[in-house]
Image (cartoon, rainbow, N blue to C red):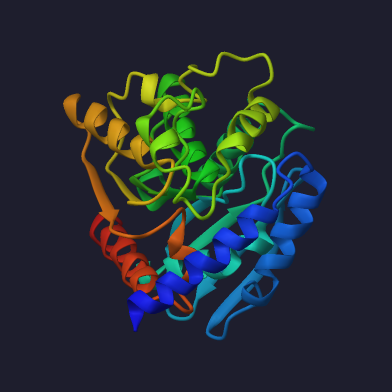
């Protein structure tokens, strides 16, 4: 039954993918919000509190009975150009619930209106806000999916290079870590990946990077010096174009002593964890993230 359900979801996603106009960002933003609408509402057992960090809209997600002294700072996915607190509220609620801590989601600035390094700067601003609010770096973990997973790692490198104490750990769901798109999986998986459009990736990357070097450490961490990063747990689907981003990054990070844990989920796709309401594998994956964060955030 679970495999049949996964098959049907992939079939639906492939149908939607064939209709996507990846050149129209406004339409993509509206479509993403609409697609997530049925899943994004407040869930029972949580408190959702809007807040502001300067001009940036953020939201606290607090599961009942959680440890309010620990925080998951989460960066949503969406190619650096789409996505919001709304599209990712339900997924982050589950990660917070399984972790037993609260979460803070931010609406960082999106491309192409605000190109690199706007998103990295906003992530750093949110982290500084938490530190100035009384949390120590050991009370905070980073997390994100897709572009938000890339932003998670890029922000760690950015903070490290500024000699700022890093958060205790990080989680990344199908992170986008190579804007040169040179991993073998970009072409090898493009026809079976039900989520990502191969022809659209260079366009969306250019929207974000502008004239910056796509191999820069705060854009494509697969090319960066990774020494000194905190423990990172990565999950990626076997059938997604970004598979090699995760495998290459994990191999390089381990070589310099970083505690990296990588799970590759057979027959799964890009950010499959977001389908936790209908997919047992996604629920299991989110619980694994929760176990990792419970282990780290003591």
- Drawn side of residue 254 relative to residue 279, left or right: left
Q: Nearer the viewer, residue 53 or 119?
A: 119
Seen from the viewer's position, the closer of residues 222 and 202 is 202
Residue 59: in sight, yes or no? no
Give the x, y percent position of residue 210: 69, 20
Residue 88 position in % (x across, y down): 59, 61
What's the residue at 48%, 65% (across, down)? 10
Q: Is residue 275 above or below residue 5?
A: above
Q: On the rendered image, what quadrant is the C terminus found in? A: bottom left
Q: Position of residue 23 (x, y in %)?
A: 75, 39
Q: Residue at x 54, y 53 (%)?
A: 195
- The quarter of the picture where the N terminus appears is bottom left
Examine the image and state in which quarter residue 292 appears: bottom left
Q: Is residue 178 left or right of residue 213?
A: left
The vertical placement of 274 against 126, above or below, is below
Give the side of residue 243 with respect to residue 90, left or right.
Answer: left
């Amino acid at each position: 039954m679970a495999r049949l359900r996964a098959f049907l979801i992939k079939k639906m996603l492939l149908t939607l993918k064939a209709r996507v106009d990846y050149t129209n960002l406004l339409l993509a933003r509206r479509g993403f919000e609409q697609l997530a609408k049925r899943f994004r509402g407040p869930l029972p057992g949580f408190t959702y509190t809007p807040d502001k960090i300067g001009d940036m809209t953020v939201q606290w997600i607090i599961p009942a009975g959680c440890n309010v002294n620990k925080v998951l700072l989460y960066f949503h996915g969406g190619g650096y150009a789409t996505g919001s607190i709304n599209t990712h509220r339900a997924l982050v609620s589950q990660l917070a619930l399984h972790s037993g801590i609260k979460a803070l989601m931010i609406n960082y600035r999106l491309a192409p209106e605000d190109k690199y390094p706007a998103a990295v700067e906003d992530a750093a601003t949110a982290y500084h806000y938490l530190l100035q609010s009384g949390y120590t770096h050991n009370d905070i973990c980073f997390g994100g999916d897709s572009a938000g997973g890339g932003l998670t790692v890029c922000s760690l490198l950015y903070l490290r290079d500024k000699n700022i104490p890093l958060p205790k750990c990080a989680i990344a769901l199908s992170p986008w870590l190579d804007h040169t798109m040179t991993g073998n999986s970009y072409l090898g998986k493009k026809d079976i990946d039900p989520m990502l459009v191969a022809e659209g990736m260079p366009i969306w990357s250019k929207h974000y990077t502008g004239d910056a070097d796509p191999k820069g450490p705060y854009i494509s961490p697969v090319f960066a010096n990774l020494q000194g990063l905190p423990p990172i747990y990565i999950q990626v689907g076997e059938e997604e174009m970004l598979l090699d981003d995760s495998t290459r990054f994990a191999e390089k990070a381990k070589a310099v002593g970083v505690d990296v844990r990588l799970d590759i989920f057979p027959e799964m796709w890009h950010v499959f964890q977001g389908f936790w309401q209908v997919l047992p594998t996604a629920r299991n994956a989110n619980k694994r993230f929760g176990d990792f964060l419970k282990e780290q955030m003591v």
